[in-house]
Amino acid sequence: MKPRTTLTLLVVLGIVFSLTAFGQLRDQGLSMGVGAGAALGITDAVTANDAQFFARGFFRHPIVKALQGELGFGVGRIGSSDYKTQIIPIEYRLVVSPFKAEKVNPFLYAGGAALHYTVESKPENPTSTKLKAWTAGIPAGIGVQALITDGILFEISGGYTYVFSQHLNGIIETKKDAYATAVAGLTLVSESPNADPDGDGLTNAEEKQLGTNKKIADSDADGLKDGEEVKTYKIDPLKMDTDGDGLKDGDEVRLEKTDPGKMDTDGDGLGDGEEIQKFKTDPLKADTDGDGLKDGQEVNTTKTDPLKADTDGDGLNDGEEVNRYKTNPLKADTDDGTVTDGAEVARGSNPLDASDDVPKKEELKVEVGKAIILEGIVFATGKADVSEEAAMRLETAYNTLAQNPEITVEIRGYTDNVGKKSSNIKLSQRRADSVRDHLVSKGIAAERITAKGFGPENPIAPNTTAAGRQQNRRIEFFRTK
């Protein structure tokens, strides 16, 4: 194969490899390599230049991402049928890898060279007197690396070196000489500490410091790349569940939107995992049911349902019961009366007091030391029996005593002035006793009621008329305590 054809093939291969490149092979550490191939002189030789043997070795070091510096040493010949020249280039190149690569890595290079040449076979009529000397040159070219195995690459390159001399073929021409090379060989490479071979956002140096796997993007298999965990979410890339809440870090970020570094994202007293997996509450909402109690308080303290605002269905939400009314949110009727807590609050009664569950019946409003006439309690002339109508009228007095066990009273009986006074006193006593006996028969304790007859004393109306005398025949309710 002719040298020009070889160089053309190298360029084509470089373009093809660049189109299929992927990964990050371009981020390399220290490397060294050797190769052999051909060199082609580009001079004004009398006959056509032929391909000659050429070999070189090199040492590379990283400068910045995708850029390396290379110190190389080569040895070979250029020539044709009328001359042969040994060349020994010592070069420093800048090697650029413009594409992200994992298995193949196309690169470009350019640099400077110190070139020692020796014209070993002179043309018939040499015009140059500098047949052995040092000169300078500018090398540039293209190449590609292919991954064989970890740390070993196959490398081919082709390039052109412009030489600041006209003497390489023993003839002084009108333009400077040059030569082209095509080299294939092996490169031993260490990975750059700045490389990120697994594409997780962490360099090799960072992964070494953290203890993560530089070949696996997600070392703990939690659904997040190691770089995301360290740099974005500030969590442990070696722990699948950094906060120990029962959820994978990746699930927290991608699915639940909770904080993978915080066990209880909403601060409600329940771990995010508990909320999702056990209680079905919202880990982003401290009070899922909006009842005024945090989910954790409901689960751990009040034992109410964190998904139900009114656990006992009494018409008051759990928070109102606990914080405002001090009722039991697990019991619809806290005081065990006959009315639910919500109904009591709505009507203004006390949900903690069973005695007011049934509304009080009508009572007499009388102060201690004062008397009130029991209206409608009248008797026929000379009679002391409690009539059916009078018994109905006595219900209010009964309610007063039944609903207020602390009250004691004196039942006072009065008559008009018709007849003897002594007889009227006895009659008024019988009437007072009759009323007392009626109340005691309905369940009022006898010791709470006394009875006394006053006869015609203390009239409240004139006894000169039938209507006045009727008013004076009365019963009074006198509160003694």
Image (tube, rainbow, N blue to C red):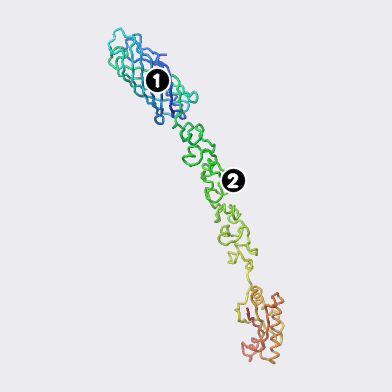
Cα–Cα gap, marks 1 and 2: 63 Å
Residue depicted at x 58% and y 66%: 348
- The disc placed on residue 60 is none
On the rendered image, what quadrant is the N terminus found in? top left
Label 1: how many Cα within 10 Å (few below 14, some 14–19, many 20+): many
**Location of residue 10 in the rendering, given as x and y in whole percent from the top left corner:** 42, 20
Q: In this view, does 319 lie to the left or right of 412?
A: left
Q: What residue type is disc 1 on?
A: Gly
Contact flag, marks 1 and 2 (Cβ < 8 Å): no
- The answer to whether residue 453 is above or below residue 285 is below
Q: Looking at this view, is 256 or 472 the one in front?
A: 256
On the rendered image, what quadrant is the C terminus found in? bottom right
- The answer to whether residue 23 is above or below residue 291 is above
Look at the numbered disc 2 and give the secondary structure of its residue.
Answer: helix
Please name the residue that numbered disc 2 is placed on: 277
Label 2: how many Cα within 10 Å (few below 14, some 14–19, many 20+): few
Q: What residue type is disc 2 on?
A: Gln
Q: Looking at this view, is 90 or 357 the one in front?
A: 90
Look at the numbered disc 1 and give the secondary structure of its residue.
Answer: strand
Can residue 374 be seen here? The reply is no
- The answer to whether residue 111 is above or below residue 436 is above
**Location of residue 124 in the rendering, given as x and y in whole percent from the top left corner:** 30, 7
Can residue 316 be seen here? The reply is yes
Q: In this view, does 257 lie to the left or right of 305?
A: left
**Location of residue 440 in the rendering, given as x and y in whole percent from the top left corner:** 70, 77
- The answer to whether residue 305 is above or below residue 31 is below
Residue depicted at x 36% and y 18%: 89
Please name the residue that numbered disc 1 is placed on: 158
Which residue extends farthest top? 124
Residue depicted at x 62% and y 68%: 356
**Location of residue 433 in the rendering, given as x and y in whole percent from the top left corner:** 70, 82
Q: Looking at this view, is 463 or 173 the one in front?
A: 173
